[in-house]
Image (cartoon, rainbow, N blue to C red):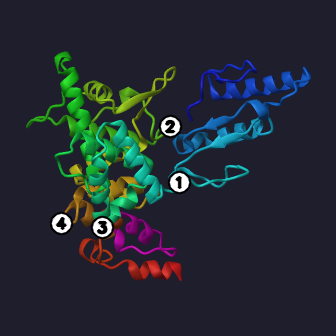
Amino acid sequence: SDVPQQSNGCDCGCFASTFADFIADVEVAGARRQANGGKRGMQQICRFLLDGWDEVPVAMRDIVADDILRIQHLLPVVVTSRPSGYVTSLQIATRFQITPLSFESMRILMREWFIEAGRPELELQLSLHLDNHPGFRELARNPFVLTLLCAVTARDWRSPIPSSRALLYERLFQLAQEYCNSNHRTKGYAWKSNEHSNDASDASAAAFETLSSESGGCRYQFELASLHPPNRDGERIAELLNLSRLITLVHEGAEQWSFLHPTVHEFLAARHLTESNHGADLVAAALKPEWLQVMIFACGLSGNHPDQAVWKSLRQVAAKRDRFGLIALRLAAILKEVNCQDGGVTLLGDDIRPELWRCLL
């Protein structure tokens, strides 16, 4: 989804400003090399990486897939995607799944990270914490989550280490606000919270609105003007997010922005869901596969408290049954976030394990 303006390291002289132009230039360069009797083909000198297929607008995927097919005979194409956005209709010859880090790889990452940070003694502290929270340790096998956890541990080594992904991202959000307040307060930009307004809540509402946009564009990319929570100063919220380094410019020419990472976008949308207490929105999100990560964050923020609005809405979802057990599978992923041990009896009012067994057998 992030097409380079120039193919660095390529001696074919191709230059492009758009994806379509890039494809056309590669085809021209390949024909030129073949006509000139080049000893090495394009496949030997170029590799094309299409990073983040899950962030390509759904309406554009067929077009992009056709463009990939056009250049596959000229040079190898590598496509990356999070599982939530992967589609088997994309005609790729060989598929690889990047598996979670092994426990040994986790130790290596933590050791190298803390040595580089000058705090090698924190490796043991974080390792013991993960051993005491096996559910969270499984989540930390994701390299991004583990790296973020190392950073938070080094920054707040006197404070308790987060024991869930939702708490970890909440701490990241707090650190980003602190960074902005300490570096940009003199410019008139600082995160505020009072009886009349709450900038953090406004930012969460803006993230939810952009993620749920049905304008046909990429759900994870947006224009700054769209970061406009209802009845609030959208320009101020956009600038706060920018100065906090939570959003970044993706396509300069098109003025397209995105959050630091898709999961940051999903986390802030989840914050809004838990704060707004809109039962209809919660039920609708729980029934959509693309909103699963948002719901996992929302339940992590709500904790093991069945009286929270999130769990009340999920009890309505749990009462539904579908032929293939997809609802039970989604609920299982959500319950894992809060380390539920009774199959959902306390939080959902029902044990989903028999339904899971039915699906498997």
Q: Give me the residue at 52% from left, 74% from top.
A: 324
What distance separates the C-alpha of mark 2 from that of mark 1?
20 Å
User: Residue 181 falls in which quadrant of the image?
Assistant: top left
Quarter of the rendering occupied by the N terminus: top right
Magenta stretch, residue numbers: 317-334
- Tell me which amino acid carries mark 3: Asn
Residue tagged 4: 307
Q: Which mark is residue 339?
A: 3
Residue tagged 2: 217
Residue 94 locus on image (x, y percent): 70, 52
Say whether residue 331 is magenta: yes
- Tell me which amino acid carries mark 2: Gly
Residue tagged 1: 83
- Name which of mark 4 and mark 3 comes first in the sequence: 4
Residue 197 locus on image (x, y percent): 14, 35
SS of the residue at dot 1?
helix
- Tell me which amino acid carries mark 4: Asp
What distance separates the C-alpha of mark 2 from that of mark 3?
36 Å
